Amino acid sequence: MKASDLLFLTVLLSLPVQLNKFFWPQFSFVFGIPQDLLAISVYLSDVLILFYILVFAAEFIFKKGAKDRLADFYKRQKIFILAAIAFNLYLFVNALFISDRPILSLWFSSKVFEFSLLATFAQFTLSKNKVFKLSFTVLAISIFWQSCLIFLQLIFQRSLGLWFLGERSFSADTPSIAHVYIFGKQLLRPYGTFPHPNVAAAFFAVGFIILSARKGSKITKLNIFASALSLLSVFLTFSKGAAAAILAGLVFICKKPFYLTLVLLLSVFSAFIFFKNLPEGQVVSIAERLILSQAAVELIFKNPLFGVGSANFLHALSAFNLFSIADVRLLAPVHNVFLLIFAEEGLIGLFLFLFLLWAALKNISARWQFALAFALIVFLTVDHFLWTLQQGRFLFWLSLAYILRFSKGHIA
């Protein structure tokens, strides 16, 4: 194996690790309150991704036959590469000439550029069957320790002090912490080492779908165990979006009519139970999301072509002076990535993002890739973390890399 292959597997292993350093320039404060989404943040995964990109590029360029490899590189994914270049160029131009806070927007644009390079290079690394198979083991290991952490956080109703893995300190009494009501009792939703239970659930859902690509006689007990843990952990995080994504994924993955019918019935039953017993807290959450969506639409009408600038949604939202039903100031991104990009990057940015998404998804060649694409669309539609948070971006661009890989069908 090449050094870049080993580095990629190390990058993949770092996905759940939230270890980072925050810097707080003036633009990261709104109403005098520091906002994580606006901070300059450097993660361990950023450092590893940078090393991977540099080593991959060095191996690619400075070895014999580089010109032929470059031509093949471009030929295989011409549309995606051109779409990624156009989208990144637009983000940087928008940051320099449209945004009221160019440094904030440039930092955000550099993050998108970093992860788009990761997806562009990782698709080639993952096209090697040996690396692809080893990636299952790496994902299974991450799923195993994250599931253990999720379970323990749920039992003890607090974090476990694993700061060296990026676990934040919290308990059931921490302000603004995520809760769920079970039989009238309020419980802390477990975070793992992710910034929110929904992001942790998305990791398990994406991991489950990718592990389903491993078919045939060589499937390992570790893969089976990790897949079962993924399913369990998604429901332990109480993330409805991830549950919907994973159930929809099962519809695409299942081939036998019996299992497909079972999954469909389970989906209908789950939806019926959820809407029939909608808790008050969930009603408030839905109302807040609708208010944020309305604010996003107003921003779009004010700045339809170019938007308000990358990562500027919170600052623009602060001028609306919005409050929730519980009389809490609403200061969060709209929970729909398409609306968020439209508001921040304008119609041009949204068109380029959709073109990029299409350029990647047109490479789908297997049922598990279709399931993965559908899960991404679900998360893009019901939340913002694939666009705004480090580990969310990681999941999004990594998923595109798995979809873009060259090999057809399943691995036996």
Image (tube, helix red, strand yellow):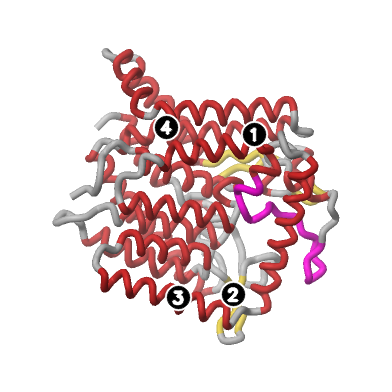
- Give the amino acid type for the residue marked by disc 3 in the picture: Val
**In the displayed structure, does residue 268 sit left or right of residue 59?**
right
Task: Find residue 91 and report its image quarter.
Answer: top right
Q: Secondary structure at mark 4?
A: helix
Q: Position of residue 340 (x, y in %)?
A: 66, 47
- Give the amino acid type for the residue marked by disc 1 in the picture: Ile
**Distance in Å between CA atoms under marks 2 and 3:** 21 Å
Q: Which mark is residue 180?
A: 2
Q: Earlier in the sequence, mark 3 or mark 4?
A: 4
**Distance in Å between CA atoms under marks 3 and 1:** 38 Å
Mark 3 = which residue?
268
Q: Magenta part of the protein: which range?
A: 323-340
Mark 1 = which residue?
348
Q: Position of residue 190 (x, y in %)?
A: 53, 67
Return the residue found at the far bottom: 183
Q: Secondary structure at mark 3?
A: helix
Nearest to the observer: residue 168 or residue 314: 314
Give the residue at x 46% y 51%.
16
Q: Earlier in the sequence, mark 2 or mark 3?
A: 2
Nearest to the observer: residue 83 or residue 183: 83
Q: Position of residue 210 (x, y in %)?
A: 34, 52
**Distance in Å between CA atoms under marks 3 and 4:** 38 Å
**Distance in Å between CA atoms under marks 2 and 1:** 39 Å
- Give the amino acid type for the residue marked by disc 2 in the picture: Val
Q: Earlier in the sequence, mark 4 or mark 2?
A: 4
Q: Earlier in the sequence, mark 2 or mark 1?
A: 2
**Which quadrant is home to the N terminus?**
top left
Q: Earlier in the sequence, mark 4 or mark 1?
A: 4
332 in the magenta segment: yes
Q: Position of residue 86 (x, y in %)?
A: 55, 27
Mark 4 = which residue?
120
